[in-house]
Amino acid sequence: MTLHILLQEYWPHLVFLVTVSASAAAAVHAAMTKNDVRAAISWVGVVIMSPLFGPFLYLIAGINRIRRDQISQQRDKSLKEYARLPVPKALDIASHSAPQFESLSILGDKVSHHPLRNGNHIVLLQGGDETYPAMIQAIDEATKSIALQTYIFDHDSEGQKIVDALTRAQERGVEIRVLIDSIGSKYSRPPIIKLLRKRGIRTALFMTNPLGMRMPYANLRSHRKILVVDGRIGFTGGMNIRAEFVTAVAGEKTCGDTHFKVEGPIVLQLISVFAQDWEFTTKEMLPYDTWCCETWDPPQPHAPARCIRSGPDRFIENTHNMLLGAFAVAQKHIRVQSPYFLPDATLLGAINTAARRGITVDIVIPGSNNLRLVNYAMTAQLDQVIRNNCRVWSARGNFNHSKLITIDGAWSYVGSSNLDPRSLRLNFELDIEIYSHDTARTIEQLIDAEIRNSDRITPESLAAMPFRKRLRNRIIWLASPYL
């Protein structure tokens, strides 16, 4: 019997054998490699219930191809290069923030590879109207090096201004490296990476071509936002580079966001994170003397701060652990502003426990969200915090992308992380913790202003929604780990 006749006669049996084998292999892999039981059960269920599509989906979105041993070795090598400064003496946390945060700083020592350092000057920037001009000014004053990392870098009027500033810097002989996430680079057409490369600016895409296929990693993304100029001035926070955050362009539809300009020792931590991601992507190690600075003279006031990086590698639990610790030591007030509030059961338990201890918990979410499915899932979960006396506020007005947490007017956690499954487990994120009354007070005022322009969500308002919408929200909520 020839192979052609054999295939004609038995192709249904062969297809059945291949699908069963693929499903079994994918299910076994998920069960053996997923540390989160919910993720393991979800993927096994998808594979078994959809024997044709399930294994393919798992191959693309379910496998963490970031080999922990490989990336860890690269980062250890870079960390040694970027850790020349001596470890600082223990700080008096109580004098900078509040006594209850002394234990949190110890947790940070265990969670982060970066030490808590004093002498940082931190300035909050609101929206593109303040952030982009400050970034361009820093770029125009650069004399040695510029490192820029972002998730979205749109090819629009504001993106063009950043490219023009980088071009001017390059013409002055400044060393420049730009790292854009491969998924985020596709938010505008044509992608701005073509323009950057046309200008001769060294640019790379983070996470491309898995297994030799011409496609980006479908489920692992760099969500970090970093700009470091001459190793002295840094910018980080939640802002991408998009014209929709600029009033002169977007007008009445301008979206809100928050970013931070930092000066001081924490800038060395920012460039360290960038250098490690750049090396992982391009295999190029950036020389310390070109990209770093060891002396700073930032203006007053100063604040202790450090970077907390997280991602689907050995740092996967970092933000999760920091927030669990922070909610546990809160004594008066927790304020959270997040565009995508979908914490897992453990974080929900920590937030609810704080509220049951008598801590005032305010959670601000956008009334108008840019991700409809996430908004549905988020709404389906709100009753779990509201019934435990947390106050949830739906902000009126345009979408606000800010990610801000402050506790007891003394400690703040800001950066790129959302409180959703993607940020907590799949994205490469970067946040900073700040022990400062001044910074916390500024963030509190920002969040309280949002609350004054918000409608409170109550059990009654949730129950008043039509049943079909509540059912829709719960169905979408079931898929929240994949949003």
Image: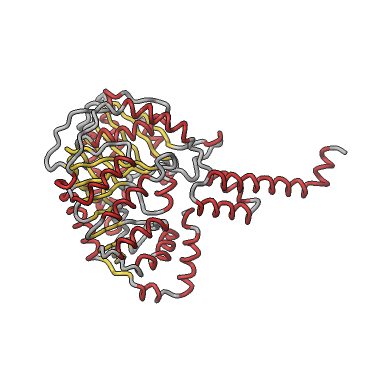
Q: How many marks?
A: 0
Task: Determine whether, in the image, residue 115 is placed left or right of residue 380.
Answer: left
Measured as percent of width and height from the top left, residue 78 is found at 36, 28
Measured as percent of width and height from the top left, residue 84 is found at 26, 26
Q: Residue at x 30, y 46 (%)?
A: 415
Residue extending farthest to the right is 1
Task: Determine whether, in the image, residue 129 is placed left or right of residue 372.
Answer: left
- Position of 276 relative to 469 (above/below): above
Residue 154 can be seen in this image: no
- Position of 281 relative to 472 (above/below): above
The front one of 2 and 424 is 424
Q: Residue at x 30, y 64 (%)?
A: 355
Q: Residue 7 appears in which quarter of the rendering?
A: top right
Task: Determine whether, in the image, residue 412 is placed left or right of residue 311.
Answer: left
Q: Residue at x 34, y 56 (%)?
A: 339
Q: Residue at x 29, y 45 (%)?
A: 237
Measured as percent of width and height from the top left, residue 49 is found at 63, 56
Q: Residue 236 appears in which quarter of the rendering?
A: top left
Task: Determine whether, in the image, residue 29 is placed left or right of residue 291.
Answer: right
Measured as percent of width and height from the top left, residue 43 is found at 56, 51
Q: Residue 456 appears in which quarter of the rendering?
A: bottom left
Q: Quadrant of the N terminus?
A: top right
The front one of 220 and 92 is 92
